[in-house]
Image (cartoon, helix red, strand yellow):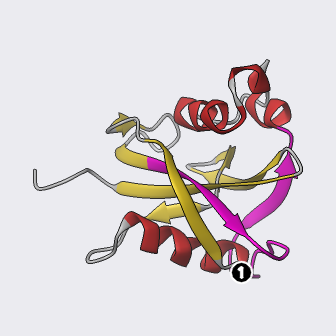
Amino acid sequence: MNGPVNLRAYGLLARDNRILISEEKVAGKNILKFPGGGVEPNETPEQALRREFMEECSLSIEVLRLLHVPGTLFSPWTHTHYTPMYYQVDGIGKPVSPPHEPLTLSFLSPKSATSSGRMANPELEAIRRLFGDDSTT
């Protein structure tokens, strides 16, 4: 293996103590995740994240810091291996998903997002690292 398996970059955009969540259908399940996606060849995770935010949210972002890299995991949604990286990001303007993107964007409180039962464990940990341990209880 030359590098991480299915490297993915996701961004946590927080405003007014709320987090931008992307509601998507993945493998037939309605899940909550952060905007982001696959890192393409010859692209850094940060470049991929900026590209994905533009594609999914019509929003230019600044990557602030790396929050969480849990390693290569097995997805409970797609039943495949992936290697996610979670970044804190900032951006100005209203996130809007283009018509060709089948997703819904909204800002949720950390507790609403984490108690939904529709987020994978690495996302829950990324929220804890951004907002603190008491954000999910």
Q: Which residue is mark 1?
A: 58
Q: Is residue 34 left or right of residue 40?
A: right
Q: Is residue 15 above or below residue 60?
A: above
What residue lies at 64% left-to-right and 73% top-to-bottom?
A: 61
Magenta stretch holds residue 105? yes
Image coords of residue 5 (percent x, y): 26, 50
Per the rendered image, the range of residues in magenta is 85-109
What residue lies at 72% left-to-right and 56% top-to-bottom?
A: 22
> Picture quarter containing residue 92?
bottom right
Q: Is residue 131 left or right of residue 51?
A: right
**Quadrant for the C terminus in the image:** top right
Image coords of residue 69 (percent x, y): 41, 41
Residue most toward the front?
A: 64
Magenta stretch holds residue 86? yes
Label 1 crowding class (10 Å Cα cut-off): few <14, some 14-19, many 20+? some
Q: Amino acid at mark 1?
A: Ser
Q: Is residue 58 above or below residue 136?
A: below
Image coords of residue 43 (percent x, y): 33, 75
Q: Is residue 40 left or right of residue 128?
A: left
Helix, strand or loop at label 1? It is loop
